[in-house]
C-alpha cells in the first residue's frame, strides 16, 4: 500500500500551522476588532486564545493517538463509524471550493493595492496562482512546509516589529477615550476574531507526514496557537494605541508601517499580505488533497485518487482539488457571489467539522481526558449559535451527503457496523 512520506520537521509543521492561522487576517482582523470593540478587543483576543485551547488540545491528542491523513474525518470515523467519517471528509472537501475563492478575493485586494488590474486580468492571476500551488504540492509537503515557514514568520515578524517600535515610543501614542469593560463587546470581538484561528484542522491531515508525529504534532498545535494569539494581540494593541483615530486612508497596518519605519508601507504590507493569503490557500489545498487521498485509499471514492507520486505527494488528488478550485473560481466570478456570503458558508462548514471532532474526542477518550474536548463542544455550540443564519445551508449539505452515502451502502448503520 502506498503511503505518504514522513518528511515534515517540527519547524516546518509549525510554519504551516502559523501561516494557516495568520492567513488572510493578520493585517486586517486586528483593525476590525479594535474598530468594533475598542480596548475591549484586547480582552476579546485573550478570551479567544483561552477558548480555542481546548479545541487545540483535543486535535493534538487525537493526532497523537490516531495519526492519519484523513484528519478530522478519520477521528469521526473512529468514534461514530464510516458513514459519519466520510460525511466529514466530504464537508471538508466542499469547504475548499467555497473558501478558496474567498481567500482569493482577499489576495486580490492586496495585489490590486500594488498594481492596477482589470477584472479579467485579476481572474487570470487567480487561475495562475492555482497552477502555482498545484506545482508546489506535487513536489511534496516538505517543499510546501519550507515555503510556509518563511512566509509565516516574515508576516508575523512585521507585526511584532511594529509593536516593539511603538512600545519604545518611536511615535507618540494617540490619546484614546476611556473605555469601560463590557462583556458584550469582548464577546463580539472574540466572535469576529475566531475566524483567524480557522486552520487547526488542516494540520491534522498532515499528522502522518511528521518525522516524529507523536512528539512534534501536539507541540506544533499548542505552540502555534499561542504564537498566533500573541501576534494578533500585539497587532490589536498597536492599532488601538497608535492608529485608531489617526488621519489616514487604507489599512491601519500600512499607516503604522509608514509612521514607524518610514515609507514603502503600501508596497511591503501589500506584498506580505498577498503572500500570506497565498500561504493560507496553499495549506488548504495540501490538506484537502490528503483528505481526498485518504478517501480514495479507503475505497470511499475512485481508487486512483489514493496513489502518490515519487515525491510522496498524492498527485491525482492534488490535480482533482486544483481543477475543482479553478472551476469554483470561474463560477463564483461569473455569479459575483458576495465575499461575506462565501465566508459565512465556509465558517459554518468549519464549525460543523470542529463540533463533530470534539464529540469524537469525548467518545474516544476516557476519564479526565474528556474534560477539554467537552469544553471544546461548548465553544463550538456557541459559535454555531452565532452562525444561525447560515446553518440551514450546512444542514442541507450534511443531509445530502448522508443520504447519498446511505443509498450507496444501505446495509451500513450510522455507527459503521453492518445491519
Image (tube, grey):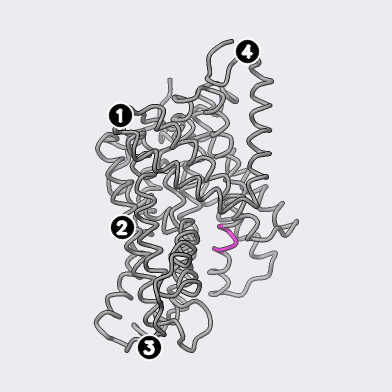
* Mark 4 element type: loop
Q: Nearer the viewer, mark 1 or mark 3?
A: 1
Label 4 or label 2, whichever lies nearer to me, is 4
User: Marks 3/4: CA distance?
Assistant: 68 Å
Label 4 and label 2: CA atoms lie apart by 47 Å
* Residue linked to disc 1: 367
Residue 316 seen in the figure? no
Q: Which mark is residue 175?
A: 3
| Of pointers 2 and 3, the one earlier in the residue sequence | 3
Disc nearer the start of the sequence (1/3): 3
Instruction: Indicate the quadrant containing the N terminus: top left, top right, bottom left or bottom right.
Output: top left
Residue placed furthest toward the right? 335
Q: Is residue 106 magenta?
A: yes
User: Gap in Å between the C-alphas at discs 1 and 2?
Assistant: 30 Å
Q: Which residue is tagged 4?
A: 411
Q: Residues within 10 Å of mark 1 (few under 14, many from 20)?
A: few
Residue 413 picture quarter: top right
Residue 361 percent coordinates (x, y): 40, 32
In front: mark 2 or mark 3? Answer: 3
Dot 3 crowding, Cα within 10 Å, few <14, some 14–19, many 20+: few
The answer to whether 167 is drawn above or below residue 47 in the figure is below
- Residue sitting at 75 percent across and 56 percent down? 335
Distance between the alpha carbons at the discs numbered 1 and 3: 51 Å
Using the numbered discs, state the Cα–Cα distance from disc 2 to disc 3 in whole angstroms. 29 Å
Q: Nearer the viewer, mark 1 or mark 2?
A: 1
Q: Secondary structure at mark 3?
A: loop
Can you identify the residue that label 2 sits on?
227
**Highlighted range, magenta:** 103-107
Magenta: main secondary structure = helix
Disc with the residue nearer the chain's start (3 vs 4):
3
Front-lying residue, 117 or 229: 229
Q: Is residue 72 above or below residue 28?
A: above
Amino acid at each position: 500500500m502506498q503511503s505518504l512520506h514522513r518528511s515534515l520537521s517540527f519547524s516546518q509543521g509549525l510554519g504551516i500551522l502559523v501561516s494557516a492561522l495568520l492567513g488572510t487576517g493578520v493585517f486586517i482582523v486586528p483593525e476590525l476588532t479594535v474598530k468594533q470593540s475598542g480596548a475591549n478587543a484586547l480582552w476579546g483576543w485573550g478570551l479567544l486564545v483561552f477558548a480555542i485551547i481546548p479545541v487545540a488540545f483535543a486535535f493534538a491528542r487525537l493526532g497523537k493517538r490516531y495519526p492519519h491523513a484523513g484528519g478530522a474525518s478519520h477521528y469521526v470515523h473512529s468514534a461514530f463509524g464510516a458513514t459519519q467519517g466520510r460525511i466529514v471528509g466530504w464537508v471538508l472537501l466542499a469547504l475548499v471550493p467555497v473558501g478558496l475563492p474567498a481567500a482569493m478575493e482577499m489576495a486580490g485586494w492586496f495585489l490590486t493595492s500594488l498594481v492596477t488590474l482589470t477584472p479579467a486580468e485579476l481572474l487570470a492571476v487567480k487561475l495562475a496562482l492555482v497552477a502555482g500551488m498545484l506545482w508546489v504540492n506535487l513536489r511534496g509537503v516538505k517543499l510546501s512546509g519550507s515555503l510556509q515557514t518563511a512566509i509565516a514568520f516574515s508576516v508575523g515578524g512585521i507585526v511584532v516589529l511594529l509593536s516593539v517600535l511603538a512600545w519604545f515610543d518611536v511615535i507618540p501614542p494617540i490619546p484614546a477615550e476611556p473605555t469601560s469593560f463590557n462583556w458584550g463587546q469582548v464577546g463580539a470581538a472574540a466572535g469576529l476574531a475566531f475566524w483567524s484561528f480557522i486552520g487547526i484542522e488542516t494540520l491534522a491531515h498532515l499528522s502522518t507526514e511528521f518525522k516524529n508525529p507523536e512528539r512534534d504534532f501536539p507541540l506544533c498545535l499548542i505552540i502555534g496557537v499561542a504564537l498566533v494569539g500573541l501576534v494578533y494581540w500585539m497587532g490589536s494593541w498597536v492599532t488601538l494605541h497608535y492608529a485608531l483615530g489617526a488621519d489616514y486612508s487604507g489599512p491601519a497596518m500600512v499607516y503604522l508601517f509608514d509612521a514607524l519605519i518610514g515609507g514603502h508601507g503600501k508596497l511591503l504590507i501589500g506584498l506580505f499580505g498577498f503572500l500570506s493569503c497565498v500561504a493560507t490557500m496553499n495549506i488548504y489545498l495540501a490538506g484537502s488533497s490528503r483528505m481526498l487521498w485518504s478517501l480514495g485509499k479507503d475505497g470511499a471514492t475512485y481508487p486512483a485518487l489514493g496513489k502518490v507520486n515519487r515525491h510522496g505527494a498524492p498527485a491525482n488528488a492534488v490535480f482533482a482539488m486544483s481543477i475543482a478550485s479553478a472551476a469554483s473560481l470561474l463560477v463564483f466570478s461569473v455569479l459575483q457571489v458576495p465575499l461575506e456570503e462565501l465566508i459565512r458558508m465556509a465558517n459554518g462548514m468549519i464549525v460543523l467539522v470542529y463540533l463533530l471532532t470534539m464529540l469524537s474526542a469525548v467518545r474516544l477518550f476516557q476519564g479526565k481526558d474528556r474534560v477539554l474536548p467537552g469544553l471544546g463542544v461548548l465553544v463550538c455550540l456557541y459559535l454555531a449559535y452565532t452562525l444561525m443564519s447560515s446553518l440551514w445551508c450546512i444542514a442541507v449539505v450534511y443531509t445530502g451527503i448522508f443520504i447519498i452515502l446511505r443509498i450507496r451502502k444501505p446495509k451500513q448503520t450510522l455507527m459503521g457496523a453492518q445491519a
